[in-house]
Image: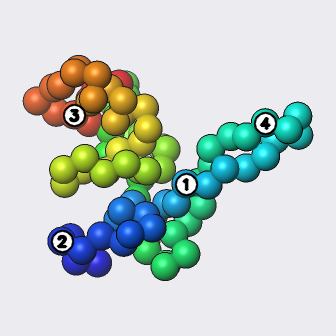
């Protein structure tokens, strides 16, 4: 996939957000693979020396991160290496 043209549905992450209803009638966020067939990306962040196993559902610059790592970046916990934020 060309890095300059991201899918409108998944923004290049390969994952699409949708809501699913829980048994008690509430809703929760979930992710499914992009229907356009783009390869799924996983979070580029790490914690404790291990790669993050979560789907990379957000794009930040040239990196792809999970919801938790993106929150750390946007909260101003900037670092020379954003993959080590959490």
Please state if 30 lies on the left or on the right of 80 as rendered: right
Is residue 43 something that shows in the picture?
no
Q: Is label 1 or label 4 in front?
A: 4
Residue at (28, 22) in percent of width and height: 75
Earlier in the chain: of badge 2 and badge 4, it is 2
Earlier in the chain: of badge 3 and badge 1, it is 1
Whole-percent x and y of residue 51?
A: 38, 40
Residue at (26, 36) in percent of width and height: 83
Q: CA distance from mark 2 to mark 4?
A: 38 Å
Q: CB of mark 3 within 8 Å of CB of mark 1? A: no
For the residue pair 22 and 41, the one nearer the viewer reads as 22
Whole-percent x and y of residue 18?
A: 61, 55
Please state if 7 lies on the left or on the right of 74 as rendered: right
Residue at numbered disc 4: 26
Please state if 56 lies on the left or on the right of 5 as rendered: right
Give the quarter of the image for residue 38.
bottom left
Secondary structure category for the residue under label 2 = loop
Q: CB of mark 1 within 8 Å of CB of mark 4? A: no
Q: CA distance from mark 1 to mark 4?
A: 16 Å
Q: Report crowding for label 4: few under 14, some 14 to 19, many 20 or more residues within 10 A (C-alpha).
A: few
Which numbered tag is attached to residue 82?
A: 3
Which numbered tag is attached to residue 4?
A: 2
Q: Residue furthest right?
A: 23
Whole-percent x and y of residue 48?
A: 37, 25
Q: Is label 3 or label 2 in front?
A: 2
Residue at (55, 66) in percent of width and height: 33
Q: Report crowding for label 2: few under 14, some 14 to 19, many 20 or more residues within 10 A (C-alpha).
A: few
Secondary structure category for the residue under label 3 = helix
Which numbered tag is attached to residue 17?
A: 1
The correct choice, above or below, for 66 with respect to 15 in the image is: above
């Amino acid at each position: 996939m060309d890095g300059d043209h991201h899918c409108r549905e998944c923004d290049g992450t390969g994952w699409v957000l949708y809501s699913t209803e829980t048994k008690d009638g509430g809703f929760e966020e979930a992710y499914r693979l992009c229907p356009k067939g783009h390869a799924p990306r996983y979070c580029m962040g790490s914690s404790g020396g291990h790669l993050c196993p979560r789907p990379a559902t957000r794009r930040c610059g040239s990196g792809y991160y999970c919801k938790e790592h993106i929150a750390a970046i946007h909260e101003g916990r900037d670092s020379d290496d954003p993959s080590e934020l959490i």
